[in-house]
Image: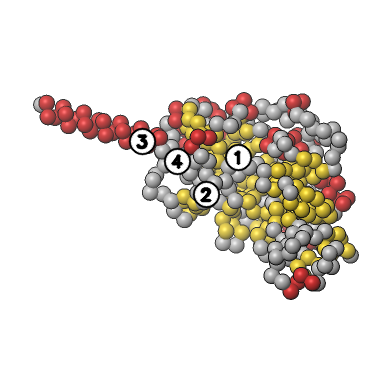
Amino acid sequence: MRKILIVFIAALVLLIGGVIGLLQRGSLDEETIYSPVSGATDADEIARGNLGRKYLTQSELGELRPKQHPDQVKYLKKLELGRWAVACEQGVECIPAIGPQFQSVLQADKWLGEGNLVLSVQLGQTVKAYPLRIIGWHQAVNDYLGDLPVVVTYCPFTGAGLAYRRPLADGRPLKFGISGRLYNANILLYDQETGSFWQQFTGEAVAGPLLGVVGRLERVYADIVPWGAWKRWHPGGEVLARPAEVEFGRRKVKVSTERYEEYPYGEYQLRQWVGYGVDVEELDLKGLASKRRIIGVEVDQASKAYVESELWEASVINDRLAGEDILVALTPGEEVKAFKRRPPSCEQSVEFELRDGQLTDLQTGTIWDFQGKPLRGELASRTVELEEIFVTPAYWFAWLLFRPETGLYPSTE
């Protein structure tokens, strides 16, 4: 009897140790290989605790594996939990997903107006438009650009349109949804494989099992532009079509295309008020409206916001940020592109201007395309390409919240 008791106690100790170890690992399956792992958050930047409704409930996690113990949820220490809001009581069931279908520019032109905004996403020669009249309802679309799995996102509360490469788990891309939670009024995505939360504005994991395991999501070019300009610049591009059905978890529901006749957050974008834990009165808006549209640019740890209307007037801005000479330019499709102005293998930076609609550098007279490649002129014979800087289209208040040390162009001081 004593031997049986000893065996039982030993087994119990092993079981408890295994459970504790599982919780300490964040409940991840150690056999699963995730990528990318570079840039993952350091352990000393991570806290653990019970976030309550700020994180997924057990019922929301449903059949997700692995699950986390509610008292052992990993989250970023730097987060101010007062700015973490539950925007929708239905949680992950609040915003339905769609299986993206695409149509030609000619087909989309039958229902899109010239001034309707679209999120332009580009990778190499692949160009797609995601009308805000659609993605404003769904906020995240799991898609592919060629063979590359991406998630295309739009936050109607911060005006941020961003696209990212989807991380891989054992070579399979993660699938993202909307958690129904916000931080700094910005949507928190969740991946359906582990239930980890991801900040849309920054692309970093902020809570859940993959925090400290997978690095920041890698950017893909995206900007918000008028449909009329986009279709003329990209006549062969693909356009997200209005879905005939949406997905609430495993349930598929038929929908009418009439719901996509207008942008769903039109009134919100006209108000100074934000809510969701954000008080714009506490921000130094430098005389700009809280929801003034800006283009954010970052070099190393420095950042600057460019007022969108000023960019349209200037078309080309030669600027300097974090000791780097940079170019911020408006394409004929009204997309904003940014580059470092020093071509590889060149000793000095060059300055740019528009000559007859063509991007031309003043030092060599070389004509460049808006992908940063020389087309004609002195530098065209070299294998050179300007280093691209990703841009962030957003509302001014949101850029200030996430980049409080930002500069502003033009300066209002």
Between circles 2 and 1, the one closer to the viewer is 2
Q: Identify the residue at image location x=19%, y=30%.
A: 8
Rounded to the nearest whole Å, what is the CA distance between mark 2 and mark 4?
A: 25 Å
Given the image, on which type of amino acid does mark 1 rest?
Gln
Q: Residue 101 occupies which quadrant of the picture?
A: bottom right
Rounded to the nearest whole Å, what is the CA distance between mark 4 and mark 1?
A: 20 Å
The reply to whether callout 4 and callout 1 are in contact (CB within 8 Å) is: no
In x, y percent, where is residue 341? 76, 57
| Left or right: 358 in relation to 268 | right
Q: Secondary structure at mark 3?
A: helix
Q: Earlier in the sequence, mark 3 or mark 1?
A: 3
Q: Residue 236 occupies which quadrant of the picture?
A: bottom right
Q: Kindly identify which residue carries mark 2.
A: 38
Q: Which mark is residue 21?
A: 3
In x, y percent, where is residue 13? 26, 30
The reply to whether callout 2 and callout 4 are in contact (CB within 8 Å) is: no
